[in-house]
Amino acid sequence: MTQRCGFVAIVGAPNAGKSTLLNRLLGTKLAIVTPKPQTTRRRILGIVVEGETQIILVDTPGIFPPRRRLDRAMVGAAWTGASEADLVMTLIDAQRGIDGEAQIVLDGLGKHSRPALAVLSKIDLIDKTDLLPLAAHLDRTGLFQSVLMISALTGDGVGDLKRYLAAAMPEGPWHFPEDQLTDLSERLIAAEITRERLFLELRQELPYASAVETERWQDQADGSVRIEQTIHVERDGQKAIVVGKGGRQIKHIGELARAEMERSFGRRVHLFLFVRVTEGWAESRQHLAALGLEDEASEPGRSRSRSRPRTAI
């Protein structure tokens, strides 16, 4: 049989279910998932094999009106992923319908010439009779080759979606070995795991003001690994919240992140977290580059960030 291989960009508004769908298609957890919008900050590549077809899924950050340099980098990463894909899979939250954020995505798609597929997500949360008018509206836009309906949470419709994606991929050799799941390094996966814990354990806006960087990865003779990570925050008050009274909060976050890393990497992990006040990190080209983000929309200029010495916990 002829091999097929291609790239599918997953785009949509924040919290449309893109990362949950990526994990469901992969059959394992790769992308972090939280109830909070704008959790995904970088493009995450996941590799799925369906028969003789290799589907390279590119999970992108949610598309929304950007304010900070970080926001522009995130939205830029999403549209870059779309422009480079063989197929753009657009997720629409069926509960929310075509709201303002979804319309921004549709307007952006109209400026791209890539083949596109609309996927109504979270269909387990609404009455099925409400889906048909929404699907008809998406079809009338003329943006999509087809409209499918799925629930990434229950798996309903995901098998049909996978088969559709496989059939849509161009003929050609596979780009990755059969057993490869992603191109992300373990260092980046470890940073994402800790960042997920920050989103889940910290309230309000603090997770959005923080970033995680894996600064040291050292394999040990006994097969374990020592990982040192820095959590960047913007102000001293935020640092105090992350650390917690007597260091209890950062210890709790570290314990949960370490357990998840051990499950992901299949080895013992010694995790050391540090908290550093890095003023303006979300506006700094240097720090965005360290996090794997590029801000092509920003004007060239000198970084305004100022880092203070980190505190070990």
Image: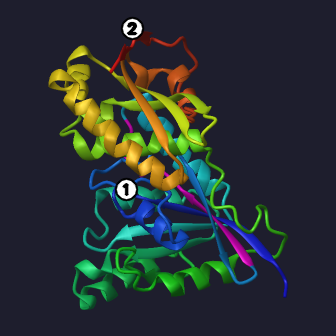
Residue 205 pos. (x, y %): 23, 36
- Which scheme is used to colour this image of the protein? rainbow
Which of the 4 image quarters holds residue 300?
A: top right
Along the line of sight, which residue is nearer the eye, 223 or 107? Answer: 223
- Find the residue positioned furthest to the front: 222
Report which residue position mark 1 lands on.
33
Q: Earlier along the polypeptide chain: callout 2 or callout 1?
A: 1
Residue hosting label 2 = 308
Position above or below: 253 against 301: below
Alpha carbons under labels 2 and 1: distance apart: 31 Å
Left or right of 205 on screen, residue 11: right
Dot 2: within a 10 Å radius of its alpha carbon, few (fewer than 14), some, or many (20 or more) residues? Answer: few
- What residue type is disc 1 on? Val
The one nearer the camera, 160 or 136, is 160
Q: Is residue 161 above or below residue 299?
A: below
Image point (37%, 47%), residue name: 39
| Residue stretch in magenta | 53-66
Q: Was residue 63 drawn as part of the magenta stretch in this picture? A: yes
Can residue 12 be spotted in the picture?
yes
Neighbours of disc 1 within 10 Å: few (<14), some (14-19), many (20+) = many
**Residue 112: quarter of image:** bottom right
